[in-house]
Amino acid sequence: MVEGEFCRHMSKDSKKVQVTGFTYDDLKNWVTVDLGMKPYRAQQLFSWIHLKRVNSFHQMTDISLAARNELDRTGEITDLEICNAVTADDGTVKYSFLLKDGEIIESVLIPDSPGLTACISTQAGCRCGCTFCQTGRGGFRRNLQTDEIVAQLYGLQNRTHSRISNVVLMGMGEPMDNFPAVSDALSIITDDRGICIGARKITVSTVGIPGGIEQLAKLNGQYGLAVSLHSAVESTRLKLVPVSKALPLPLIKRDLLDYYNRKGRRITLEYCLIAGINDTVPEADALIEFAADIECKINLLVYNPIEGVPYVRPDAESVNRFMHYLYPRCQAVTLRRSRGSDIAAACGQLGPGFNRTFSSCSDS
Ligand code: SF4
């Protein structure tokens, strides 16, 4: 019954489908075709799971007991277990979620006046191997299923009284490397029958892999796009982001221009400053030239040291110098405050260390 079309929604440890990972259309199909129920049940289910965020079919009081029993026999609502939560001095909270197969992923809730930003993961580990990133150092373990991506957001939302206003797919993993699950998750969290976070409030971050930006551009919503550039000098970028070999700078630029032309949204170029590596004047000049004909904002952040990694955090004076060199020569430059660095929740800091499966938020 759940083979074929719905097998990607199968739980890792049971024969039940993870209903939380169904887009509305998939849910309707499952309810009507597989379970033989009336189409209106899909609307009820979607609302209970994604708006009211219950974690049991038996809490769905407007659904008959017989139907609830049938749903419970074949389906499951994903409710991720939080195994650790740490709050930073600045109010940023890092949550560790324990998945059913023992993997641990992390999500971060960042108070961002006037809203709240959720940084969520799309993979356990990452195969991109960026040399400044703790997640990359831990290697790739598996893609997250759609329900595991969505349930992180609900896990965070259920732990705060304020509405999450922004979502960044910038945690563990490269979203474009798990695009089918990411695409379904985006469909679910933007659906106005559920939690309904506008596409313009959602940013997908990528280091740039072939076909990735193009796939995002084909989706309907005006999603924000952040590209982890880190250097506009090919040889430096290759050192920092080894997978950039597959998508050199001219091809990234082509994809960014195409994304802007299709979506009309300014792109963010993420640039993590590392002392002596990419904070020099020639690096700044290359960045200025790369960004010149792209409608973009350059978002500078400062490398957060990781144990065992030879990179060095630049001092405040170097950061200021780099930033002020860019200012008059670029459309927009921001310096991102490092959030949660005292709890290792800042960009690139999280990673293996808690145990084999402990990983991090860092696509930056
Ligand atoms: S920076 Fe992002 S893409 Fe690179 S290894 Fe880390 S998680 Fe993966």
Image (cartoon, rainbow, N blue to C red):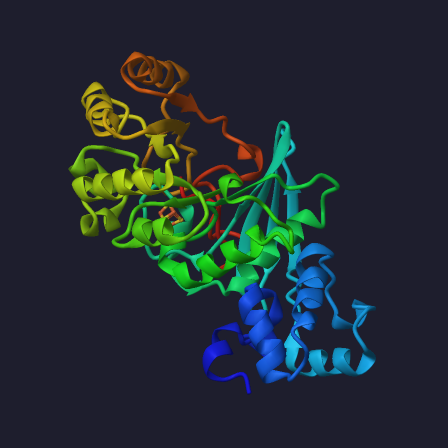
> How many circles with numbers are drawn on the protein?
0
Quarter of the image for the N terminus: give it. Answer: bottom right
Residue appearing at x 62%, y 29% in the figure: 90
Please provide percent x and percent y for residue 188: 56, 57
Residue appearing at x 82%, y 79% in the figure: 65
Q: In this image, 102 relative to 245: left or right? A: right
Q: Is residue 53 above or below residue 262?
A: below
> In this orientation, does residue 110 appear?
no
Quadrant of the rendered image containing residue 275: top left
Q: Is residue 84 above or below residue 29?
A: above
Please provide percent x and percent y for residue 333: 37, 21
Q: In this image, 55 relative to 237: left or right? A: right
Please provide percent x and percent y for residue 320: 37, 14
Residue in front for this viewpoint, 84 or 169: 169
Q: Quick one: which residue is furthest to the front in this view?
A: 39
Q: Is residue 112 above or below residue 328?
A: below
Quadrant of the rendered image containing residue 63: bottom right
Q: Is residue 193 above or below residue 310?
A: below
Quarter of the image for the C terminus: give it. Answer: top left
Q: Quick one: which residue is furthest to the bottom in this view?
A: 1
> In this orientation, does residue 324 appear?
yes
Please provide percent x and percent y for residue 64: 81, 77
Residue in front for this viewpoint, 88 or 296: 296
Residue appearing at x 59%, y 72% in the figure: 28
